[in-house]
Amino acid sequence: MSSLALVIALLILIVIILLLVLLISNLNKKNKIVKERKSVQEVGTLAMPKTFNLFFPSKIESISNRELHEIAKKVFDPFKYIDYKSMNLKELDKKEWHSWQISILLLMYKRGEEFFIPNQEKQFHSLFLSSSENDMKSLMTMIIKKYNNYIDLNKSKDELCKDYIWSNKDASTIFYFLANYKNYSK
């Protein structure tokens, strides 16, 4: 084999190696882009808060949907008249709601009941009005976890009414969520 043929063969081999390196490099880039897209999609929208493990005292669980709405309206009445919209964050963190009230509201969500609240901008703090769908789902998930961790299902209505462990923020979150969750993407 002549030296010219050897040089040509070597050049062809170098070109083939370069093409293989470029091809492998492009495949790695494409895999990285696909992985990045998947991770962005996974973070995109949180799932709706789960209620399958949310249980209530039997007296609350046995309330009909009609009664549930009536009681929820009575629970909402004081909420309507207290100026939560103007409260600062420290006031929103005050614990002024008892477990029986929160149980009623969470049962509404578990049953898929909506709670219509007109003029929400007049009722809710800007914290909620400016919150994203993911923010609200995250807040509700934390409330459900708190409920599961701290509520004794054997307590009577009277005992639950003395159990003031829920903040104004918790109650506001649930009311806002009940009024809007059906608009959230699934």
Image: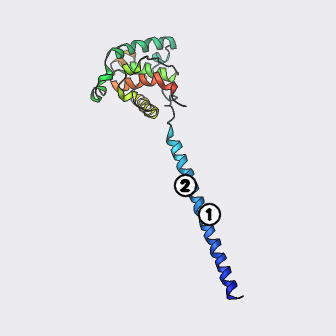
Quarter occupied by the C terminus: top right
The image quarter in which residue 129 lies: top left
Residue at 60% x, 63% y is 24
Residue at 49% x, 23% y is 109
Label 2: few (<14), some (14–19) or many (≥20) C-alpha neighbours in 10 Å = few
Which label number is shown at residue 32?
2
Label 1: few (<14), some (14–19) or many (≥20) C-alpha neighbours in 10 Å = few
Total numbered labels? 2
Q: Amino acid at mark 1?
A: Leu
Quarter occupied by the N terminus: bottom right
Which label number is shown at residue 23?
1
* Residue 164 vertical placement versus 12 (above, below): above
Q: Position of residue 19 (x, y in %)?
A: 63, 68
* SS for callout 1: helix
**In whole angstroms, how far apart are the C-alphas of marks 1 and 2?**
14 Å
Which label number is shown at residue 60?
none
Q: Amino acid at mark 2?
A: Lys
Residue 157 shown left or right of residue 5 in the figure: left
* Residue 123 vertical placement versus 21 (above, below): above
* Front label number (1 vs 2): 1
